[in-house]
Amino acid sequence: SFIITGQDITENERIKSEYQKKEQSYEILIRNIPGIVFRRNILSNTIELFSDKVYFINKSIPLDSHPSCISFFDSFIHPDDRDRLIGVLQYAVFHQEEYEVEFRVINSHGYEFHFLERGRPLLDPSNNTQYIDAIIMDITSLRKTTELLAESEERFRKLADVAPVGIYITDSSGNLQFVNHEWCRQHNITQNHAIGMPWTQGIHPDDRKLFS
C-alpha cells in the first residue's frame, strides 16, 4: 500500500517569485548607478562589490579580475589624498556617522580622476561598526567644468579691474557680489567694504527712489 501526502506550496512559490523579482529589480538599479557600490568590512579589511564594473580603476575591467583586499583598491588613490580619506573613514567608523569625501584616483593607465564617496556605517548586534556601505561616483567632468568656470571668472575679474568704467555684479537680492577698481574709485569705497552692500548705496540718496 502507499501513503501519499501533499502540501500546498502555493504561498511559498509566491514568496519565492516576489523575492526573485525584487532581486532582479535591485540588480538593475545597482547596474544603472553611475559609480561603484560596495560594502567595506571593517574587521576583515575586505570589500564586497555590488556593481558590475570597477569604474574608479578602469572604466571596463570586470570584477573577477580584482582581489577583494582593500589595500588593492587603496593603492590607486592619489598619494596626496590617501591620508585625508583614511582620516574621514576612521572618523566615520569611530563616531558611527555618515560621511562624504572627495579624492583623486590614478587609474591603471596613469590618468587622474576625481571621485566623490558617500557612505554610512552599519552596526553589529553589539552596536559596533562592522561594515560601511558606500558609493563612489566619478565627478571628473564636474570638477573640470568647475575649474574652467573658476578660470573664466578670474579672467573676467582681471579684465574688469583694468576697465575705465565702473562695473559691478549683484545677487538676486540686489547686493553687490563684485565691483571693479574704477567703481570703487567713483564711490570712494574699498572692494571689501562694498561686497554685500545694496548696489543702490552707491547712488545719491535723492535719486535712490528712482530705482525702488
Image (tube, grey):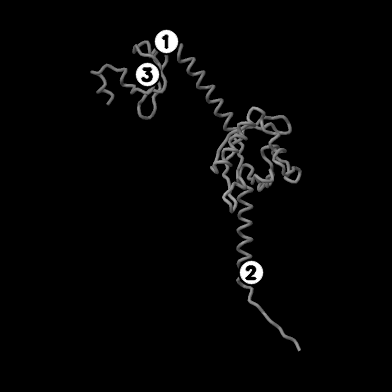
Hey, which residue is sitting farthest bottom in the picture?
1
Q: Using residue 170 as the reference point, say whether residue 60 is left or right of it.
A: right
Judged from the image, the secondary structure of the residue bearing numbered disc 2 is helix
Q: Amino acid at mark 3?
A: Ala
The answer to whether the residue labelled 3 contacts the one labelled 1, judged by CB atoms less than 8 Å apart, is no
Judged from the image, the secondary structure of the residue bearing numbered disc 3 is helix
> In the depicted view, which residue is nearer to us: 166 or 187?
187
Q: Which residue is the site of mark 1? A: 164
Which of discs 3 and 1 lies nearer the camera? The answer is 3
Q: Amino acid at mark 1?
A: Pro
The answer to whether the residue labelled 3 contacts the one labelled 2, judged by CB atoms less than 8 Å apart, is no
Mark-to-mark CA distance, 2 and 1: 80 Å
Q: Using residue 207 as the reference point, say whether residue 88 is left or right of it.
A: right
Residue 11 location, quadrant? bottom right
Residue 194 disc label: 3
Picture residue at 42% right of the left edge, 15% below the top: 180
Q: Which residue is the site of mark 2? A: 13
Judged from the image, the secondary structure of the residue bearing numbered disc 1 is loop
Would you call the spot at circle 1 few (<14 residues within 10 Å), some (14-19), or many (20 or more)?
A: few
Q: Quadrant of the N terminus?
A: bottom right
Picture residue at 74% right of the left edge, 43% below the top: 67
Picture residue at 45% right of the left edge, 15% below the top: 160
> In the depicted view, which residue is nearer to us: 199 or 137?
137
Q: Amino acid at mark 2?
A: Glu
